């Protein structure tokens, strides 16, 4: 495979991956709307078990409710949390600070 | 005296008085008017009193209502940030320290400031960027962009990341390197700049997590495609693999890779495997492609207050006969780190052993690091460590070091 073919093939694959991701958006929106309500108790357990995977667990009082939102989505990416895990932990933090 | 006489006398007296005081008879009318005015004023006063009383009682409730309304508005305003579609947040970390290297004079290390900017739209999109602001040895301010990416959340199990992101190969670079997380003041040998572990990438990435079975076990993953690293050639050899994340692709071939991780909460255990492959080129040899591959493995085990973690990474660059540096090379690094929080105290001793093997003898290093941390808070640490370094005699990497650092994560 020469340079041009290789690049074209990979570009096609990248575009396909992005298209595949974009195709998930309507389903993702529906999934968000139908997501179970965040669970405080479950969130407390997940907070205790997940945060310590990398660092000392942070006190819920360290941040305000709005600050925890962005922090938790940042951590969702870092720790590979599911959306539901993220919402559960967020609820625990927001109701414990 | 008869009645006629009395009547006469009264008549005379009245006539005399009338003649003497002609106004006295007319004074009765103004008096009555005055009395009427007084009565009217009294009525008005009474009305005013009633009005004032009513106003006082009615006015108080009106004031109260106004106050309540104002409070409601304030509460509503205070609640707005909870319901806002867009959240703006500033996080990050900072550190300062002192390093005393054997055969060199001790120096205060520059204050390093890494703010992390977050801009989030609902639970759909998160933009995050982390510049690293510091000063170099000459006092000049340096600003490096550690990462800056758009993260589009595609449901509960995936997010599309586009931009510059930390390399998902291994754990240290993407999760553990911030000074308020790293338990020692230095990175393990081979996991810093120019080592064996890739630092960052410019491209796109898909990452997320999902339940593994019905329990609480989780699988997490990251797959990416990016511009890839470049090799630095010097004196006919590949000096190092530069992997800070390039906004160009000299070889025209992308690098693909990723990591898959498993988290078992009941065992407090994390396991991960990483790999990447592609082509790289020299900084001055864009037309000469070389094979490039990375493999890695990592784990972390945290029973109670004890933590044991380790990581291995190998980065390999292929040969290129027509290059100024025809021979490729292999960079390997690994470390094992143990830490333990002492009882109910804030003291935490740390021990780490690491090793880096490169194509150059002066780059090879074996390192023991013994440290002691004091935790002022969960995000404020004072760290002191001593590194016992073993490398080519006379090389800077052979000198032992004492490091002290104060770090804060916010």
Image (tube, coloured by chain):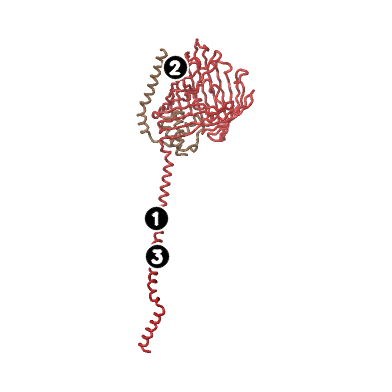
The residue indicated by pointer 3 is: B41
Q: Position of residue B394 (x, y in %)?
A: 63, 18
Chain A image colour: brown
Quarter of the N terminus of chain B within the rendering: bottom left
**Could you tell whether B89 is left or right of B356 in the image?**
left
The residue indicated by pointer 1 is: B58
Q: Confirm whether circles 2 and 1 share one chain.
A: yes
Q: Distance between the residues labelled 2 and 1?
A: 81 Å
Chain B image colour: red
Q: Where is residue B268 in the image (x, y as percent from the top left)?
A: 48, 29
Q: Confirm whether circles 3 and 2 share one chain.
A: yes
Of label 2 and label 1, which has the lower sequence position? 1
Is residue B373 at all visible to an observer of this figure? no
Q: Are dots 3 and 2 in contact, CB under 8 Å? A: no
Residue closer to the observer: B385 or B78: B78
Q: Is mark 3 on a helix, strand or loop?
A: helix
Q: Is residue B27 above or below residue A63?
A: below
The residue indicated by pointer 2 is: B253
Q: Is mark 1 on a helix, strand or loop?
A: helix
Of label 1 and label 3, which has the lower sequence position? 3
Q: In this view, does B398 lie above or below B180?
A: above
Query: Alpha-carbon neighbours of circle 2 within 10 Å: few (<14), some, or many (≥20)?
Result: many
Q: Position of residue B192 (x, y in %)?
A: 54, 23
Residue closer to the observer: B57 or B339: B57
């Amino acid at each position: 495979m020469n340079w041009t073919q290789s690049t074209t093939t990979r570009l096609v694959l990248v575009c396909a991956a992005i298209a595949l991701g974009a195709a998930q958006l309507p389903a993702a929106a529906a999934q968000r709307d139908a997501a179970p309500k965040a669970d405080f108790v479950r969130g407390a357990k997940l907070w205790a078990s997940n945060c310590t995977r990398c660092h000392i667990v942070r006190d819920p009082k360290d941040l305000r409710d709005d600050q925890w939102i962005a922090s938790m989505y940042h951590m969702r990416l870092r720790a590979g949390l599911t959306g539901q895990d993220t919402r559960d932990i967020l609820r625990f933090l927001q109701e414990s600070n | 005296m008869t009645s006629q006489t009395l009547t006469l006398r009264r008549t005379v007296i009245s006539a005399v008085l009338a003649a003497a005081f002609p106004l006295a008879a007319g004074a009765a009318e103004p008096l009555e008017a005055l009395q009427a005015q007084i009565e009217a004023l009294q009525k008005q006063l009474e009305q005013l009193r009633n009005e004032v009383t009513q106003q006082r009682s009615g006015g108080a409730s009106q004031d109260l209502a106004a106050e309540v309304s104002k409070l409601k508005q304030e509460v509503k305003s205070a609640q707005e940030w909870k319901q806002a579609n867009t959240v703006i947040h500033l996080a990050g970390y900072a550190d300062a320290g002192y390093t005393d290297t054997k055969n060199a004079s001790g120096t205060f290390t520059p204050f390093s400031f890494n703010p992390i900017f977050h801009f989030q739209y609902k639970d759909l999109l998160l933009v995050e960027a982390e510049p690293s602001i510091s000063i170099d040895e000459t006092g000049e301010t340096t600003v490096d962009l550690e990462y800056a990416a758009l993260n589009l959340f595609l449901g509960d199990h995936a997010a599309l990341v586009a931009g510059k992101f930390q390399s998902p190969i291994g754990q240290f670079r993407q999760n553990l390197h911030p000074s308020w997380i790293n338990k020692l003041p230095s990175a393990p040998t081979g996991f810093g700049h120019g080592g064996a572990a890739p630092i960052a990438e410019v491209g796109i990435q898909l990452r997320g997590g999902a339940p593994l079975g019905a329990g609480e076990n989780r699988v997490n993953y990251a797959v990416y495609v990016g511009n890839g690293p470049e090799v630095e050639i010097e004196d006919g050899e590949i000096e190092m693999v530069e992997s800070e994340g390039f906004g160009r692709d000299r070889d025209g071939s992308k690098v693909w890779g990723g990591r898959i991780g498993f988290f078992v909460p009941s065992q407090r255990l994390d396991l991960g495997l990483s790999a990447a492959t592609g082509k790289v080129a020299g900084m001055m040899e864009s037309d000469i492609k070389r094979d490039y591959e990375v493999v890695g493995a990592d784990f972390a085990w945290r029973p109670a207050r004890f933590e044991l973690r380790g990581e291995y990474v190998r980065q390999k660059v292929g040969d290129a006969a027509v290059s100024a540096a025809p021979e490729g090379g292999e960079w390997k690094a690994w470390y094992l780190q143990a830490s333990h929080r002492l009882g109910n105290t804030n003291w935490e001793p740390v021990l780490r052993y690491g090793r880096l093997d490169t194509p150059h003898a002066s780059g090879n290093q074996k390192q023991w690091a013994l440290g002691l941390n004091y935790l002022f808070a969960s995000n404020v640490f004072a760290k002191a460590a001593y590194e016992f370094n073993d490398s080519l005699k006379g090389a800077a990497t052979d000198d032992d070091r004492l490091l002290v650092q104060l770090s804060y994560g916010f």
